[in-house]
Amino acid sequence: MEIKRGIPVSPGVALGPAFVVETEGTHIPLRFIDKRHTTREIERLHASLQNAIGDAHANRDAISEKLGKQYGAIFAAHALLIEDPELVREIEQLITQKNYSAEYAVSRAMRRHAKALQALNQPIFSTRASDLFDIEKSILKHLVGQQGDPLQNLQSPVILLAHDLTPSQTANLDPRMVYAFATEAGGKASHTAIMAGVLEIPAVVGLGRILTDVSGGDEVIVDGNRGVVILNPDEETRERYLVLQRQFGTFNKRLDELRELPAETKDGTRVLLLANIEFPQEAPHCFDRGGDGIGLYRTEFLYLNRSRDPNEDEQYEAYMAVLRAIGPDKPVVIRTMDLGADKLFNQADIYLDEKNPCLGMRSVRLCLRNLSLFKTQLRAILRASRHGDVRIMFPMISTLMELRQCKMIVADVKEELEEERIDFNRKIPIGTMIEVPSAALMAEELAKEANFFSIGTNDLIQYTLAADRTNEHVAALYNAGDPAVLRLIDLVIRAASKHDAEVCVCGEMSGDPIYTILLLGLGLRQMSMTPQNLPEIKKIIRSITLEEAKQVAQEAMRFATARDVNNYLREQTRRILPEVVVN
Ligand code: PEP
Ligand code: MG
């Protein structure tokens, strides 16, 4: 049995067989073989090498005919490489001496050579490294068979283990087939982590090296509450986790009973509990979990996983689907696309080759550079606005000028619609995310020109502490309880209340039970989160008075380190609601 610790990002406990996804997307079903089967494995290896050589020759002939002999020669060289006796010997030795499966041995050997070439840091050798990756794929194709997308073709439920998953890969996981996932990379507020919460798949990220310790089919436990992954558990641990799994289910069932009750403190202060969604299909989850509306619709997910951008009508239809699910009277905050950073889409031509995309052309910056993309979206939102309580929100605003520019574009689009006699809500509220420290510091000025704020703590933490939200190596620095972050949040709430702007928190912090009392005590009356978290947060709000919350907030603001803040808040949360799981 081996116990690994990582970052818990989606609660729940799951047990099941491991399914290991290799970095390059090929799933290697088995890493180690029984010693008795080495001869058979070597035969499989040679058959696949012959097939891969056949492919290279076929490519050589086809390309020579189409483009000329000099291009065909690239594939002739591939064939020679595959036949290279030294390489073949190395792979054979990995099978006979280390008991690797043929697939794993090929992958190991090819990558070792490719990485050595890459390390030379010269373009000519990098090209050779890419050739090696190509050859690896070709041999693996014959060994493993054509897999298609391994994540889409799961035949029975598994625990997924990967180096990392992209947000769109995660968005496409089927929760009936993926009981849980665990990744080596990733941070608390990465979009992959957020998607796990949306799909209600227990998940742990940022585990560091784990793939080398696990083979396909090994039994794995993922504890998404505590951030623990256990490989090959012993019988006692297994039993203990089966009990924990049942307890977690019972607690959740009890929370379901709160669905129809308002999120109100014991002394009657009402808090609006809103849901974050990425796809229109998720909108009904808001009410299933007792929410009051949509506080954040991350529309950029409309642009991911497709070969062309959604046109105005397609976007309009998506927004209407949300409105139909939510009804005309509940708020629906549509955030304009926040593409860039870890959310990349297909339009490669609008991305620049940036060294540091999180600090580059992301979000409204990208929109203000690509006005037709931006205007198409604004037209669709405005058209939908006459059917409900739609609000527009801009992400990643860093300066007052940016907010003004965005508002000017909205005014232009409104004018266009007027001319075309298309109806829309002329008084549509316009708000901004506060997720860049400069915006938090300028909150007073922004509050005079925006109808509402939504504090995006996922990015606010990242930019305040200069700690990448997706990077497990700086996960300890990336902390919602850091006093620097809390002071910015306090500043924003005060500025909003002074200028009568509404304020919400829509980052992952608002769905984390240890911060509920603090946020309430700081004066927050709106929180938006993954629907899965709504019942637990409602339960905490209903278990406390406003006066108690204010006292807790006052005390928490006195601490100088994240550790002290978090310890104190954990203690207070447990005191109020002992069943709650706090990390
Ligand atoms: C945030 O940054 O807190 C936020 C809600 O936006 P996203 O997670 O989509 O960047
Ligand atoms: Mg953000």
Image (tube, rainbow, N blue to C red):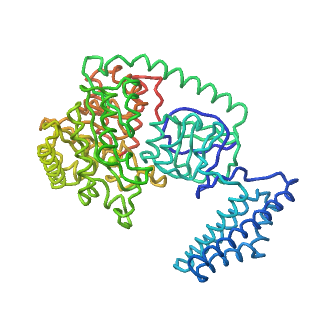
Place of residue 525 in the rendered image (x, y in percent of width and height, measured from the top left): 25, 29
Left or right placement of residue 346 versus residue 59 in this view: left
The answer to whether any part of residue 406 appears in the image is yes
Vertical placement of 8 versus 68: above or below?
above
- Residue at image location 17% in from the left, 37% down from the top: 424
| Quarter of the rendering occupied by the N terminus | top right
Give the quadrant of residue 538: top left
Place of residue 14 in the rendered image (x, y in percent of width and height, measured from the top left): 60, 33
Place of residue 287 in the rendered image (x, y in percent of width and height, measured from the top left): 37, 24
- Residue at image location 86% in from the left, 54% down from the top: 37
Vertical placement of 252 versus 494: above or below?
above
Left or right placement of residue 133 versus residue 121 in this view: right
Foreground residue among 339 and 535? 339
Ligand number 1: quarter of image: top left
- Residue at image location 38% in from the left, 19% down from the top: 259
Vertical placement of 83 versus 329: above or below?
below
